[in-house]
Image (tube, rainbow, N blue to C red):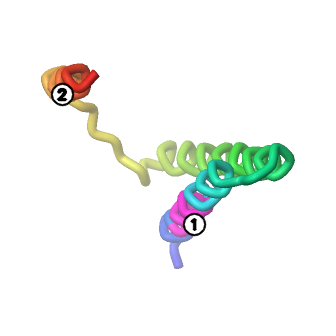
Amino acid sequence: MQDKEIMENILLNLKGECDLLMHATVESSTPNVHAAFKSALDETLAMQSEVYAKMAAQGWYPQTPAEQKQIDAVKQKFSAGC
């Protein structure tokens, strides 16, 4: 397995963990449980950000900048609903 594939798998797993922890935080029934899940979520988000940054630095997570007209269209769409 190549480094890129390993990093992609790590990032995918971290994203899944973030999703689970976010739902656990939202659904927690007590302040202590909420705080524990939120702390774990914050740590996992930090790890996800670090892995993403390393992948982007290697060119393994290319980004395509959005055109201004696309940004404006999304802004207009969501501001109309408010």
Circle 2: is it few (<14), some (14-19), or many (20+) Cα within 10 Å? Answer: few
Q: Which residue is mark 1?
A: 13
Circle 1: is it few (<14), some (14-19), or many (20+) Cα within 10 Å? Answer: few
Place of residue 22 in the rendered image (x, y in percent of width and height, measured from the top left)? 61, 51
Q: Which mark is residue 50?
A: none
Place of residue 52 in the rendered image (x, y in percent of width and height, measured from the top left)? 54, 48
Q: Is residue 21 magenta?
A: no
| Residue at (53% x, 69% y) in the render | 9
Query: Does 34 sit left or right of 69 as displayed?
Result: right
Q: Which mark is residue 77?
A: 2
Chain part drawn in magenta: 9-17
| Residue at (53% x, 79% y) in the render | 1
Amino acid found under the numbered disc labelled 1: Asn
Query: Does 82 sit left or right of 24 as displayed?
Result: left
Q: Nearer the viewer, residue 41 or 33?
A: 33
| Residue at (69% x, 49% y) in the render | 41
> Helix or strand or loop: what does disc 1 sit on?
helix
Q: Earlier in the sequence, mark 2 or mark 1?
A: 1
Place of residue 36 in the rendered image (x, y in percent of width and height, measured from the top left)? 82, 50
**Chief SS of the magenta region:** helix
